[in-house]
Image (tube, grey):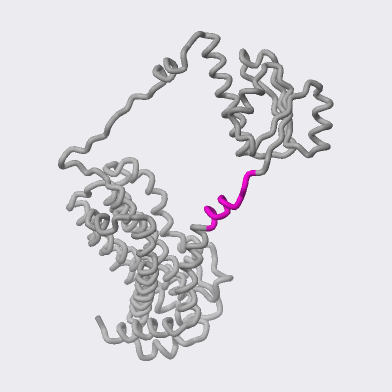
Amino acid sequence: MRNDTLKITGWELMRNLRNKQYIISLLITPLIMVLFAGLPRLLEKLDKPSVMKLYLIDGAGVAPQLQQMLPKDEFIFEVKQDKREVEELVYNEKASGYMVIMPDFYETGKLEYHYNKRNLSAFGAVKASITHILKLQRMSSLQIEPSKLAFLNAEAQIDQIAMEKAAAPKDNAMAVSITFMVLVFFLIFTSGSMLMQSALQERRDRMAEIVLSSIKPHHLMQGKILGHLLLGVIQMSFWIALSLPAVVYLLDFPLLQALSETNIPLMLFFGIAGYLLFSTIYVSIGSTMDDLQSAGNTQSMIMMIPMLSLLFITPIIKNPEGTISKFACIFPLTSPMAMITRSAFSNVPITEVGLSALVLLASIYVFVRIAAKIFRVGMLMYGKTANFSEMMKWLKYKD
């Protein structure tokens, strides 16, 4: 590696480490993640259910059973006969609504639910209780014992037992792989965004003219990519160091066992290779933009390329040995995330891992060459954001 690349790497690294915004994001982001993870559970505990008052025009006599089945501190039922009187009471008392249960309810299974205040969770509880009462009554009329009906409706219980050499997915390994994949996604998008902004700022401030007078463009680009990779690694390491004690002690997660069951070298290789692949795209696109607001649809679409992997996650989980799964593990734009996911659910043959790695490395080499040409011309062009056809012309320029 050329000395110029290392100099740019160190410069990008130290410049951002001294940046207050980077330090603040390093500390604030874990707190925000914890807040978003814990806030819904906290709100759920604090959100005490309100009392739901319902009037019943009960022609089938279900009120006593319904009152016994539903919590008394959440539901209040009052039986009435006159529909007009009930409607007035609902509006005057601001009740939740009323139900009309006809005498032939047990035959038709139909009733009317008129609501004044909509509450989907409460409605679901009422519906489940009414359905249970209906089933019990129908079983009684047909002289079927509940135990016999449960016996008839019982599903077959199949115990899945992995053979000695079978590729049986392990929960702990899957948890580690999925967490690592999320971290790689986060690294790609955060570092990619920083790379684009760095290239854009230097292009806009015309610093590139000074820098490129003494350093070759591809060395500048490579230094930026490696510098932001190190920044991302520092960021991830800091967050992991903060979260590991909570994961191990609060969740009682067997971390050492999970790591021993996970293919760590494979995940690290494809994670870093995926970052290098997408970062070359991001930094080259950043060099073609005059500002973020003027970026066209082409740039916006390219920024979302890593999201292609999400289209293949479900097929990989359902059928790790399927054609779609194998294709996703070879196609370079999806192989980093696809291979990490697939390795958690099956033992990927070494030949397929090797083929995927070779294709990915070859793609990185090609993308770096293409990105270097776009970066070289884009950093010295001012006044507008380049379109796709212009970037294609740049590829024909000689170095």
Magenta span of residues: 39-49
Q: Is 230 covered by the magenta stretch?
A: no
Q: Quadrant of the N terminus?
A: bottom left
249 or 113, which is in the foreground? 249
232 or 179, which is in the foreground? 179
Please indicate whether residue 35 sits to the left or right of residue 84 in the image.
Answer: left
Q: Is 46 covered by the magenta stretch?
A: yes
The answer, for residue 393, to whether it is visible in the render is no
Please indicate whether residue 113 sits to the left or right of residue 218 in the image.
Answer: right
Picture mark count: 0
Asked if 9 appears above or below 285 in the picture, the reply is below
Residue 74 at x, y percent in the picture: 64, 38
Asked if 227 appears above or below 298 in the picture, the reply is below
Residue 81 at x, y percent in the picture: 78, 21
Q: Of all residues shown, which one is farthest toward the left?
A: 164
Q: Quadrant of the C terminus?
A: bottom left
- Quarter of the rendering containing residue 102: top right
Asked if 105 appears above or below 70 in the picture, the reply is above
- Quarter of the rendering containing residue 340: bottom left
Identify the residue shown where x is 53% and y is 73%: 385
